[in-house]
Image (spheres, rainbow, N blue to C red):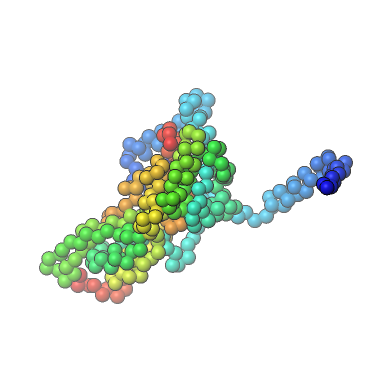
Amino acid sequence: MSLVVDRRLSLLDRLYLPGIFRGMRITLKHLFKRKFTMQYPEQRWTFPDGFRGVPALVKDQEGRVKCVACYLCQFVCPPKAITIVAGEMPGNKVEKFPAEFDINMLRCIYCGMCEEVCPEQAIFLTGTYEVAGAKRTDLIFNKARLLEIGGVRTDPIMKWAQK
Amino acid sequence: MSPARTAGVIGPPLTPESEKKIQEALKSSEEGLFVTRLEDIVNWARRNSLWPMPLGTACCAIELMATAGPRYDIARFGAERLSFSPRQADLMIVAGTVSKKMAPALRMIYDQMPEPKWVIAMGACASTGGMFRSYSTVQGVDQIVPVDVYISGCPPRPEALLYGLLLIQEKLQRGKKG
């Protein structure tokens, strides 16, 4: 047997006004509260140390590419985003340099293993995090592009002064 | 130009000609609304009221939710109406890994969306398969649906998604159909 409950609204409820006032009170209360929204394209987030953004190659203070094309980052990269083609430097102690160094930013998962494994401290995760494009080929960054993002990192030890 | 471009953001390289075209298109849409082409008005309206279809299949969907939250607030770009019905959406945001079993469902959802429609592949998995180089994962949703903007990241920050949305808006203003 079903039970019929008479849920008729009272006059006050039928006016809807108390409900509207209650709602507007909350709305107006939030009007004077602290604003949470970050006005994104104008306003930027300041990331802490150790933030993992786009990986990029760096140069030392003398403008040398620090990478020696040892292939460790290519080997360790979990999604295999890094592709290196080594070149030879005859008559130089360092012998190898990256002739080509591509990172597929759409494969990259920003894990930082390349930075961790690099024996030359040549690849770093930068603070850049907005990378988007209309074509997949646009987002395979070549060596020049990576060096442009990475910039210069001063090397206080200069272990490779004879490079 | 949108502010995102001028603030030193890394995006796809633009040639001087295409840069000029974008600026002309934006100029014609923002100056003298009443003497502009009807197409520009339609594009302006579409650009500022994209209704996204949140196709969240993995962790990128968490960032997608954060983008809709008060801190980043996707509503500032007119895309706050996340439509859970493909019939009422015009921007599909594929956020997450798409397995091969999921692929027909994804294609069906895309087909159910009315024209014109756009697709954002958000994150590494949706764009290329990411770290899942595996037999079970679709290596990029562009094998199933046409993608307009790819966003790098695992997952991308909400800002990166907003940047992708700005790229879609730019494309729309240039009059490119999805």
Q: Position of residue B81 (x, y in %)?
A: 58, 43
* Residue at 68% across, 50% down: A31
In this rendering, is residue A127 above or below B109? below
* Residue at 28% across, 56% down: A102
For the view shown, which residue lies furthest in the left direction?
A91
For the view shown, which residue lies furthest in the top direction?
B35
Nearer to us in this view, A70 or B117 = B117
* Residue at 77% across, 44% down: A20
In this rendering, is residue A55 above or below B116? below
In this rendering, is residue A13 above or below A114? above
For the view shown, which residue lies furthest in the right direction?
A11
* Residue at 44% across, 64% down: A51
Nearer to us in this view, B52 or B33 = B52
Q: Quadrant of residue A35?
A: bottom right
Q: Quadrant of residue A18?
A: top right
Judge left or right: residue A1 versus residue A67: right
Q: Position of residue A66 (x, y in %)?
A: 26, 66
Mark yes or no: residue B71 visible: yes
Judge left or right: residue A93 versus residue A120: left
Q: Position of residue B118 (x, y in %)?
A: 45, 39
Nearer to us in this view, B29 or B169 = B169
In this rendering, is residue B89 above or below B9? above
Mark yes or no: residue A43 visible: no
Q: Position of residue B37 (x, y in %)?
A: 47, 25
